Amino acid sequence: MPMPSRRLSAALLTGGTCLTLLTGCAGSSDTAGAHGPAAASAIPVVASTNVYGDLARRIGGAKVQVTSIISDPAQDPHSYEAGPRNQLVLSKAEVVIENGGGYDDFVDRMLKSAGSSPHVINAVEVSGKSAPKGGELNEHVWYDFPTVAELADRIAAALGKADPADAATFTENAKDFVRLLRPLERKEARIKAEHGGEAVAITEPVPLYMIEASGLRNATPEQFSEAIEEGDDVSPRALRSTLALFTGKKVEALVYNEQTSGPQTEKAERAAEAAGIPVVPVTETLPKGKDYLAWMTANVDALASALAK
């Protein structure tokens, strides 16, 4: 999107109120890799969200020390305000993973004044995706599994440059991760075969890549989902059109971003439930206790179950 959203989740804490902590609200200093505690000589990696932090840990294992700046599902990455503690961690990073596309601009702002030159991986640039003609870029590329597979390879390559002795291990870990992504793509293909062309509604574009890969059609008025994403008020006309999707039973499911709910999205949720239309909750960051693969498996399975009702 062209500029950071103005919306704030009810539980959002700004960087200014969290300067005394490195973990929790100022980010999560995740020192454990996928295969045990990080070594003393581990590569310092900073990720804008725990989604990318999880990928780095899986590929780097004990050879990386990962800090995810945003790790609380209650925080809205669009409107996150980083603080000095984040700046300090970034200044020491050898590898930085950001989403890009206007999603986490605070990373670029801090990097400009960090006085260091880490290897920066921009997920949107890796994806090769751009805004459609006359439209806006959907920057939520971690819901696009081919992009995540390519991103895994880029992370492995960056870690290999930082630690050439373990480059082969990073490459193998990335290959293992990509193999584990393939069942998710097969699940999407199965949804497409069984429900291709069916209409669904969304509260905002977060899950659109998953929806499109599953062969589903987004019937939501663009004015509704764009306003929600930008933190603006939805016009009465757009709200009526959206609610009519449920009262008229014109969609098979509502895919709902739990991380930025508000009065207007709650109206949509209530209308869907009243009409007997399944609601599929999604989030922008990892739920507590889940890694990327478990999270996305749950998302795809929930979508398939909703459509089967």
Image (cartoon, rainbow, N blue to C red):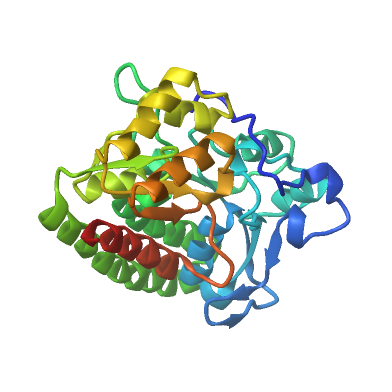
Residue displayed at 48% across by 20% down = 236
Q: Is residue 180 placed above or below 52 in the rendered structure? A: below
Tell me residue 15's x, y (percent): 78, 45
Residue displayed at 75% across by 55% down = 25
- Does the image show residue 5? yes
- Does the image show residue 128? no
- The extreme bottom residue here reads 36
Q: Is residue 298 placed above or below 191 in the rendered structure? A: below
**Does residue 120 appear to the left or right of 187 in the view shown?**
right
Give the quadrant of the C terminus. bottom left
Q: Is residue 11 placed above or below 60 in the rendered structure? A: above
Tell me residue 197's x, y (percent): 15, 43
**Does residue 9 appear to the left or right of 208 in the view shown?**
right
Residue displayed at 48% across by 34% down = 101
- The extreme right residue here reads 20
Tell me residue 225's x, y (percent): 43, 31
Q: Nearer the viewer, residue 213 or 271?
A: 271
Q: Nearer the viewer, residue 245 or 135?
A: 245
Residue 8 figure quarter? top right
Q: Nearer the viewer, residue 120 or 273?
A: 273
